[in-house]
Image (tube, rainbow, N blue to C red):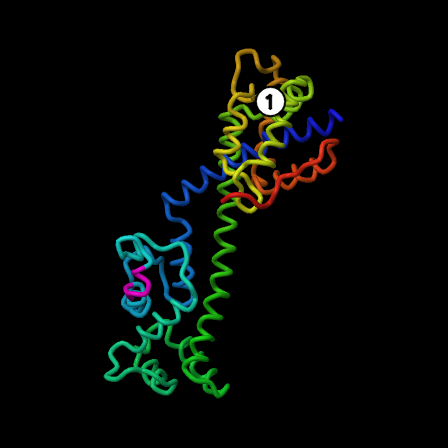
Amino acid sequence: MPWIETCIAVCLILAYLSLVCSAIQEIIAKVFRSRGHDLLKGLASLLNSPGDPQEPSPPTRRLFDQLLRNPLLTSLARDGDVLKNPPSAIEGGVFADALIQEVSRGSEELVSTLDQLMDQVCNLPVNEPARPLLLDWVEATQRAGGDLRMFRERVVAHYDRVMERVGGWYRRKVAMSLGIIAVAVAFATNADLFHITRVVASNGTLRGSLNDAVQTLARDAATTNGVPHLAAVEASLAQLPMPLGWQPHGMRPGLCGLLEKAVGILVAAAAMSLGAPFWFDVLRLLLSLAPKPGGLARGGKG
């Protein structure tokens, strides 16, 4: 069934290019520490602390700044500097323990009861942004007949809700940056979906080799969550004449040829921005329809 083989081959090329885009996006995220900076903004939002965490702090943001210097958090950051090298994630329990420690800082005795914690919260400056929120948490816990442990659980629950929102921020940023990267990669590699499909459909040898590569990845490639590593895909495609790259006379002359090329590249970029997991799921579906049995395994070596 050549049409299924053509679809499998084209999807493998799109999956490979999607992996390249994801790898570039991860490198950019690590260089700019965007996940950690979003985490800091989420913490500032949680504690009602005004301003950008990266900017000099106003005097009223004292509790937030003290929290970032707490040993429980600095131990998670590279070089112990949470502001310059923020961790990509902080567990809710760690945050709650650090917050209780900083609220209790200055107490002459160990804070072990909810009433003692309330006294410490009341001693916070009136203009401390987090003070009303902390008072609400303590009072709500008191009304529920709870103790310090229940207060901690309340903080953890609220922290987890805020981090879900932060995760949404990060996912939207990733989707936007992945789309931009996909356009750049598509233009750089001349990933014209129309051209790729024509070449694969007309070249039975290439089509068969790409289908064999998919079968090899299904059996042998190291996978994570069902998606082969980029190195494994590159190795399986290394010796194949991929229909990518800019070639002399590789475009029809005239305005129509230019428009066709631009649309083909933009369509490929849009497809690549869907992400590698999407395309490997499509490959699994297509392999289930192909005459030969097989499918990309979700397990495998890590």
Identify the residue shown where x is 51% and y is 60%: 164
**200 left or right, relative to 24:** right
Tell whether position 121 is magenta: no
Q: Is residue 218 above or below residue 151?
A: above
The amino acid marked with disc number 1 is Lys
Identify the residue shown where x is 33% and y is 73%: 128
Residue 68 visible somewhere in the drawing? yes
Percent of width and height locating residue 70 = 29, 66
- Residue 41, quarter of the rendered image: bottom left
Q: Is residue 8 above or below residue 253?
A: below
- What is the total number of numbered labels drawn onto the structure image? 1
- Residue 102, quarter of the rendered image: bottom left
Q: Which residue is mark 1?
A: 261
Q: Nearer the viewer, residue 67 or 300?
A: 300
Tell whether position 70 is magenta: yes
Percent of width and height locating residue 239 = 52, 21
Percent of width and height locating residue 23 = 46, 38
Magenta-drawn segment: 69-75
Identify the residue shown where x is 44% and y is 84%: 139
Q: Nearer the viewer, residue 296 or 15?
A: 296
Percent of width and height locating residue 120 = 32, 82
Identify the residue shown where x is 51% and y is 40%: 178
